[in-house]
Amino acid sequence: MTKYWLGADEGIRFTPSGENTAYTDFANTVPPEMTEHSRTMDTGVFEVLGKGVFQIFGYALSAMTVVEGDDGLILIDPPEDVEKGRRQYEVLRTISDKPIRAVIYSHWHTDHNAGVKAFITQEQADSGEVKVIAHRDFMSNIIANSISGDGPIIAVRADYSLGSLLEVGPEGRVNGGLGPDFVMETMSLVTPNTLVDDKLELTIAGVRMEIFWAPSEAIDEIVTWFPDLGVLQSAEVIQGESFPNLHSIRGSRYRDPQAWFTSIDKNLRPLPADFMIPSHGRPVAGRAEVAKVLTDYRDAISYVYDQTLRWMNRGLLPDDLVEKVQLPAELAQSEWLGNFYGGVPHSVRQIYVGELGWFNADPTTLAPLNIRESSRRYVDLIGGRDAVFAEAKKAADAGDHQWAAELVSHLVRIDAADTDARALKASALRILGYGTPNSNWRNFYLTAARELDGTIDYSLAIQIDAPDQIAAMPGSALLESLRFRIDPDKAAGIFTAMAVEVADTGEHVGLIVRNGVLEVTGSSPEDAALTITAPKQLIAPIVLVDARRTLDHGTDSGALTVRGGTVDDAKSFFDLFDRRSEERLHLADR
């Protein structure tokens, strides 16, 4: 039995299982600090001695917290899929055979909830047998970032950022930055039945809890304080043993750094925590050590934000800011602030855009040439395709792979079929990827390289339309997603309204088309040209698969009815919207 004392005081025991799903060998294609980081991710159980608190660690990107009460268990953050959840459930039952009384989702990201059905069912939540606790905005964020809003493009970019299309190994994924690996198979969801606003106090299984809203890495982040145990479950406010992802390069809304470090100051630092258990990374023991990690973390965020604004106010642009803003040595040396997931350079760029917007105050960038047109002109100016390729090859041979990639990108942009240019760019990106310990950067470099040279396997892509998650969403949310697929050319000059009655949920939804816009209402429009009545199991394929075929199938089976018009009228209405594309987006050609 190995003990990890992660703070000045004893009190945490680690029982390893002897596994590690990260890549842990040293290799010339992996920075040594990245390998060392992988070696901190052995699977096992951390126990806070005498507290009945455990962390099931290393089985997924997130680490699940378990609190054993008088007559039941409280779980915080199930893993990203049911398969990993089942492995964790087996480990859970070596800890305790008590029933599960509560599950807490710290926020909406799938690695903190999608494996929940390995532990509980929707029926247990519906009956109140198990409390499922989340922030009040949890479900709206799940919906907006999956079937609705920018969910589809974020899913594509997530494959690049998380390395879903790479294998684990020296030329692929090494670790997940915040955990050993991240691959999702079966995703599930149990809808919350207990919501947190700013603060919620409750006792479950004899365990007192105070749950605070702490906007940070996610806008709906909540942290859980166990006052009688002296244990703080810090969720992803403390984002593992890495500099925080103040911006996610897969794409995200602006994560306000001021709100993030303010959450630490307001909700975490005042607590007399003897132990801190994050949702990523190993636990911290000792009040002084917990306080130091919290202080260093908030100071790192504040430093990057404050110094970025300091230099922005002196007129510096993003390229200059990246050179100017670097962590001071005392913070850069912290074991909790390594360059493994979040990173200072891409955070600085996002702060600039988040505070000032995209315009850099150079009027020539207000209405620039289309990037492909400017690439064509640059290539002509340099002397044509062969001259540009020769210069890029010369740069690569000299070890200047960033410049080589930038040069040859002009050729790929104007001719995606230029196989030699694609191969040269792929080679340059691979070398850049092999040189960074940041998992997100590495995965983006290496995935783009495989897209360019045709060695990519798209069958491994993340599927955001997981049936179980779709089933947990209201029919109105499915219909709302049509807003982002209306074709204004097809809808030009059309003013029409449809009522949709979701038979099994009792929802009445209005779909009103005008001015190339879809307005979705929570009641049936009085002037609806037709009304469709169908169960949610038919609404989903109408929206997500094939409206025409589903309408025919539904009417033929009698499960769907149309009033005030015909099924052909309903088909014409849904023809105004793009079908969900099955064509894979290619990001590296741009």
Image: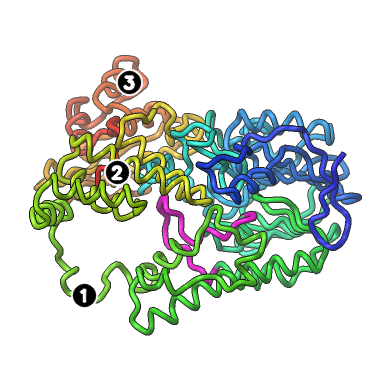
Q: Examine the structure image and report whether residue 148 is included in the region drawn in magenta.
A: no
Cβ atoms at labels 3 and 2 below 8 Å apart: no
Q: Find residue 425 and name its label.
A: 2
Dot 1 amino acid type: Asp
Left or right: where does residue 486 sit relative to residue 187?
left
Left or right: where does residue 57 sit relative to residue 433?
right
Point out the tag, 3 or 1, that comes first from the N-terminus: 1
The quarter of the picture where residue 25 lies is top right
Q: Percent position (x, y) of residue 405?
A: 30, 50
Q: Looking at the image, is mark 3 or mark 2 nearer the viewer?
A: 2
Q: Classify mark 1: helix, strand or loop.
A: loop
Dot 2 amino acid type: Lys
Cβ atoms at labels 1 and 2 below 8 Å apart: no
Q: Percent position (x, y) of residue 563?
A: 25, 30
Q: Is residue 42 above or below residue 229?
A: above
Viewer-nearest residue: 353 or 31: 31
Q: Which residues are magenta?
A: 240-259
Q: Percent position (x, y) of residue 186?
A: 54, 29
Q: Return the residue at label 1.
A: 362
- On the question of residue 508 being in view, the answer is no
Point out the tag, 1 or 2, that comes first from the N-terminus: 1
* Quarter placement of the N terminus: top right
Q: Return the residue at label 3.
A: 554
